[in-house]
Amino acid sequence: MLRYLLAIFLLCAISGVAPAQALPAIGVEPFAAEPREAEPIEPGAEETSGDLSYQLELDSEPLFHEPLLPDAMLPADVAIGIEEAEAPRPLKRRGGGGGPMGGPPGYDATWYPTQAVSGQNADMGFVRQGMNIAAPVWGDFKSGRVVLASVGVRNTLFSTDAILPDSLTAFPENLWNVNFGLNYMHQFDNGWSGGLMSGFGSASDEPFHSIDEFTANLGGFVKVPASNGRDSWQYMLMYMYGGPVNFPLPMISYSWNPNDELRVNIGLPLSVEWQPTEQLTFNLSYFPLYNINARATYAFTPTFAVFGGYEYLNESYFLADRIDHEDRFFVLEQRLITGLRWDVGKRGQLQLLGGYSFGRKFGQGDSQWDTLFDQVNVDPGPFVGAKFQLMF
């Protein structure tokens, strides 16, 4: 399992795709709000220069995770393009959390100890791990035109003797999601922002087994500043073949920024960020259809913080031996999560996390609205994990 992740990392390193500008995980602000004013630089403080001088703001961790939306379709990709193109000014690194997929370049792993499988004389434990690499391959953020390339790999390794009860076949040993993305962001002279997003890959227990296990995604967005100069309208259209929503998904929202403490995205996606004090931040977000994230983060120092919250996670795959090629294998999970976050040096961030997982359900169907067959329910239990990210 690890050799596939390492091979992709080495391939990207050899080809020169080194992490450059971080793509923040989707948090409370799927689209970038108007940036906050930069804090004044104290006399004698170090001042950096160049593209990498921007400290991107890391909101609380993902509202949803791969493979719900492959990396190429993450609205976070859009957010970073807008923020960098519109306002290359220092932003504070904040937030917390640890979700199983998405986010800046880095690696994460989460261990779920063995728990009983409901209705079967079996139990299940698993390890979920992933790696993300992203870099601009053309243009730059200062010019307002940039092409971003990304590679994301996620693997879940199961230890179980459970079966799929309707098919009477063994539960998959592995689930993989591999995605390659290419996104274009553009800042117009009139203040509007826009972009096109694309990606392809495979989400399956046997990735790239055949064309029937391929995934693809397309999308576009436009951000239009409001007349007050603080707020904006966002319009987006996304289609994800292999995702949880198997039809084009139009979205519209209004980014309301009444002050430096409160930012609200009204519509879809829905998000709220409230920072009542310099140390304390609350985040709430929703992305269709079943992706919810609530998070509180307290920063004891500029480099150390604690966080806690709730997540509703959702993934989908194509099993290679499925009978109906339209059926997908869904993974649903709810989590109470807490953890610690350290900023390591100028670019690194380490997170140690744990919590309680419940409502874990696996099953097949052509839609989450349908009654799933081959449904497997796993009893609640704890989890622990770690994540290291590069923040640029």
Image (cartoon, rainbow, N blue to C red):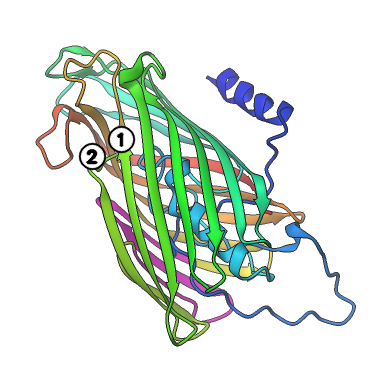
Residue closest to the eye, 204 or 183? 183
- Name the kind of residue labelled 2 in the image: Asn
Q: Quadrant of residue 254?
A: bottom left
Q: Residue at x 9, y 35 (%)?
A: 371
Position above or below: 243 against 296: above
- Name the kind of residue labelled 1 in the image: Tyr
Structural distance between the alpha carbons of marks 2 and 1? 6 Å
What is the magenta range?
Answer: 270-296
Looking at the image, residue 87 sits to the left or right of residue 259; the answer is: right
Residue 299 visible in the shown view: yes
Badge 1 is on which residue?
241
Badge 2 is on which residue?
246
Indicate the secondary structure of the residue bearing disc 2. Answer: loop
Position above or below: 182 against 340: above
**Total numbered labels:** 2
Residue 100 location, x and y as percent? 45, 41
